[in-house]
């Protein structure tokens, strides 16, 4: 790569126990993702794609191998430091938006900033900018039940990018959307990568989404290879 990777993984291994058996999910997976790059991870159901994303995001620890964010090894951090890195340098988007129904869009998006103890007025101002950047400037005071599926997913993306993360990890972010809405949501990722130099890793089953990414990696037998 010509530019230092934002996110790197080296020989990552992860297994789980199912009764008396140890099931190897990741068997030496490695990748590098540079700023502005959008990388798709594809593979069969049950191949470990979500597990890989959790390990890359510091939500789960690998049994072996190294995961680095901005050149810093997550394993060498304390739990508090990993939580701070997740809040400040990583954004997460899931297939289901996980918005809190009792809060408006702007307050859902402001939540990661509130966790940082940013003053509420400032957090809402930054959240409003993030919502505007995904085309929801007119919907900031709406609750999730008042938003369409695509609007809810774009709100979830705004929440993921409100901290201006170095990398966004997205797990099937278009899986519940119709084709046109899925394209519009993917366009948000493209604009984000170009405007903010954010790296994006997308786990997807959608061949159209994968085809629009800069690179496609396939996870099979616990390892990543070009698709």
Image (tube, rainbow, N blue to C red):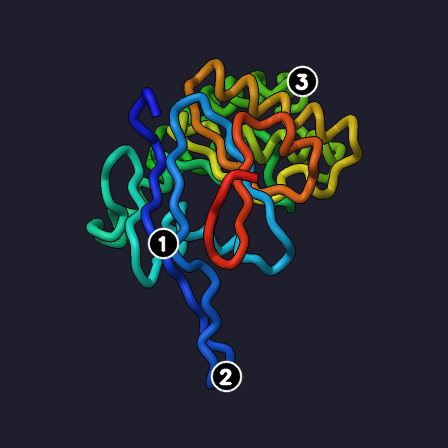
Q: Which residue is mark 3?
A: 138
Q: Which residue is mark 1?
A: 12
State the SS at label 3.
helix
- Given residues 170 and 223, the one toward you in this image is 223
- Given residues 112 and 7, the one toward you in this image is 7
Residue that appears at 49% across and 21% down: 193
Q: Quadrant of residue 175?
A: top right
Report the quarter where the C terminus lies: top right
Label 1 Cα crowd, 10 Å radius (few <14 / some 14-19 / many 20+): many
Residue 99 spot, x, y in % from top left: 60, 42
Q: Is residue 71 above or below residue 96?
A: above
Residue that appears at 60% across and 21% down: 134
- Given residues 42 and 122, the one toward you in this image is 42
**Residue 170 seen in this snapshot:** no
Q: Is residue 114 above or below residue 10?
A: above
State the SS at label 2.
loop
Residue 15 spot, x, y in % from top left: 42, 67
Q: Which residue is mark 2?
A: 19
Q: Mark 3 and mark 2: span between their CA atoms?
A: 51 Å
Residue that appears at 47% across and 81% down: 21
Label 2 Cα crowd, 10 Å radius (few <14 / some 14-19 / many 20+): few
State the SS at label 1.
strand
């Amino acid at each position: 790569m010509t530019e230092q990777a934002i996110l790197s993984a080296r020989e990552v291994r992860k297994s789980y126990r199912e009764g008396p058996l140890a099931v190897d999910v990741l068997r030496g997976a490695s990748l590098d993702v540079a700023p502005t790059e959008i990388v798709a991870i594809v593979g069969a159901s049950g191949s470990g794609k979500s597990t890989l994303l959790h390990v890359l995001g510091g939500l789960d620890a690998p049994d072996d191998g190294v995961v680095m964010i901005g050149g810093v090894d997550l394993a060498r951090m304390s739990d508090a430091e990993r939580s701070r890195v997740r809040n400040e340098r990583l954004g997460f988007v899931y297939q289901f938006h996980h918005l809190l129904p009792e809060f408006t869009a702007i307050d859902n998006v402001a939540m990661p900033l509130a966790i940082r103890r940013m003053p509420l007025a400032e957090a809402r101002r930054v959240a409003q900018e993030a919502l505007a950047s995904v085309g929801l400037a007119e919907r900031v005071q709406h609750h999730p039940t008042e938003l369409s599926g695509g609007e809810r997913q774009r709100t979830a993306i705004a929440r993921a990018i409100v901290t201006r993360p170095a990398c966004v990890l997205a797990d099937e972010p278009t899986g519940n959307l119709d084709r046109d809405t899925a394209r519009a949501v993917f366009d948000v990722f493209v604009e984000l990568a170009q405007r903010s130099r954010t790296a994006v890793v997308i786990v997807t089953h959608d061949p159209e989404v994968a085809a629009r990414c800069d690179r496609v990696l396939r996870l099979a037998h616990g390892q990543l290879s070009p698709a």
